[in-house]
Amino acid sequence: MGGDFSLDQKRYLEGFVSGAQAARAGRGLAPAGAPAPAAEPTGPDAASHRAMARQEAEGRRLTPEEKAKREELGLDSYDKIKAYARDGQFPKGQDMLRWKYHGLFYVAPAQDSYMCRLRIPGGILTHWQLRGVAGIAEAHGGGYTDVTTRANLQIREIAATAAVAVLEGLVDLGLTAKGSGADNIRNVTGTPTAGIDPQELLDTRPHAREWHHYILNARDMYGLPRKFNVAFDGAGRIGALEDTNDIGFQAIEVKDGFGVAPGVWYRLALGGITGHRDFARDTGAIVRPEDATRVAAAIVRVFIDTGDRSDRKKARLKYVLDAMGFDGFLAKVEEKLGAPLTRVPAEAVAPRAEPDRLAHLGVHPQKQAGLSYLGVGLPVGRMSVSQMRGLADIAARHGDGDIRLTVWQNLLISGIPDAAIEAAKAAVAALGLSVEASPLQAGLVACTGSKGCRFAAADTKGTARAIQAHCEGRVTLDAPVNIHVTGCHNSCAQHYIGDIGLIGARVPINDDGDTVDGFHLLVGGGFGADAAIATELKRDVKAEDAPRVVEGLLKAWLAHREDGETFAQFSRRLDAGTLVTLADREVAP
């Protein structure tokens, strides 16, 4: 065969040779034509490579993703990303994983484009950063952004040629997308009202930022078997859902008389992963706030050493804890720290104030006299670039200049003088957005869904909007209800913790195998002091029928609840058959 190799052929051969050399090195063999390497891996990737080698020595086959990371860690792929952008090409094969190390997700076939996920520690950014992201989304994306359930932003519909312009434009704004996807520590969440909350025990901002910068500057933090989530909750009015994270730092007050300095500490909770039906559990250990980063780093390094690299479904911290037990795992953490963790009995911890499930919408006074924050509702988390610029203007003109994203897919504008509240509310309304604390809107959460994610089985955002539009005119709620609509078992919208949870499914409509968008429906989930995993109530609900089904459930609760009974308590008290019968009766023609 004559002629030069094509660009794709050259890249394939380069990858093949690189992979062969890496595979030889992983078996302790010298690359072809090179002297034998040291028997023991060295450098910042050594711990993850040793973990891979140990599992292979045990006769366990590494996943393709682990082999790809050993051949070339995504952090080292930037030159290839630039070359692909110049050529207008999207990644293929394991390069799709590598690109995620830089926050770029190729989301075909849902959209033949990239999605870029940012890193915003604690969900707090400045008005000029929000305006700058709007400019990037307008120039290189689809003209909008989505707020995520990790208090983060996503830019979607990015062309292959625009990948580098987006990444470098974010850095120019003092932001980054590094490590926001793939097998990395995801965006660090914190209390959105940190530093302004009258109820909080602790301002989580410095700790979330310190951990964020540590991750960015410690190469070995990118050697994980799978993704990892960390949250800091300061016990404020808006929760950070820290108990759904691999590590949850919960601000608590330790009483006097228990052998440790009284005052505010972090309680250490581990193993949250609600998509796998588990919450982070109290370890009995407490951490001084200034030591949080050091302890988190030790935990992650033990996970790097011990996490499963042969089964992606089991490659999360929960399964290490299940296998080793909390005491066994913490013993390894203490080895990394070189010192024991501090432990106190449960009675040493004062009760924590509960969050307010409506505090992320509407006007709320800050701890600073004469100032309030304004919670702005974003329908299923989406903002147009014109709305982003308008919100940035409101924050600059009427507030302290900060924009605070929440895990409830909305945002807060903080530091508004009391005299400026009405002007700020009017400006928000002029953008087509609302600040009203509607119980239905406050608890409605939806992931990207099939319109933008290749894993999703249904249009989640469209269904969530339809539920809101249908129910708001038919049901008058007098208490919060959380409705979480997720597209697949990755559970980005955390359907297992919703009062009502919907997970996407293909629903059969005939015997020929034809299907339509639909959902399996669950009830009875909760979080915080009311933590519970929802249980399945109905399967194969067509998407077009979901609003009416939700209407029936809400009306059944309002008609048949006991005094003060929440929806979660109501749905847990009744068996599934009774609940379905009552709900169907409420919407019967």
Image: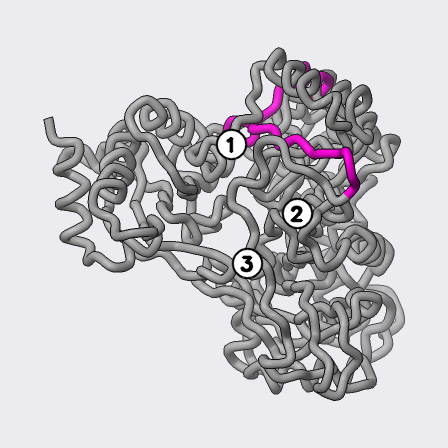
In the rendered image, residue 353, in percent from the top left (x then y), is placed at 59, 59
Binning the other alpha carbons within 10 Å of mark 1 as few (below 14), some (14 to 19) or many (20 upward) gives many
Which of the labelled discs sits on residue 359, or is there none? none
**Quadrant placement of the N terminus:** top right
Q: Looking at the figure, which quarter contains the C terminus?
A: top left
- Report which residue position mark 3 lands on: 244
**Which one is in front, 388 or 138?**
388
Q: Helix, strand or loop at disc 3?
A: helix
Alpha carbon separation for disc pair 3 and 1:
24 Å
User: Disc 1 designates what residue?
Assistant: 437
Asked if the residues shown at circle 3 and circle 1 are in contact, with their CB atoms under 8 angstroms apart, the answer is: no
Identity, as a three-letter code, of the amino acid under mark 1: Ala
**Are discs 1 and 2 less than 8 Å apart at CB?**
no
The residue positioned 83% from the left and 59% from the top of the image is 219
**In this rendering, the label closer to the viewer, 3 or 2:** 3
* Left or right of residue 185, residue 436 in this image: left
Residue drawn at the location 55% of the way across and 75% of the way down: 60
Q: In the rendered structure, which amino acid carries the disc numbered 3?
A: Thr
Assess whether residue 379 is covered by the magenta stretch: yes
Q: Earlier in the sequence, mark 3 or mark 2?
A: 2
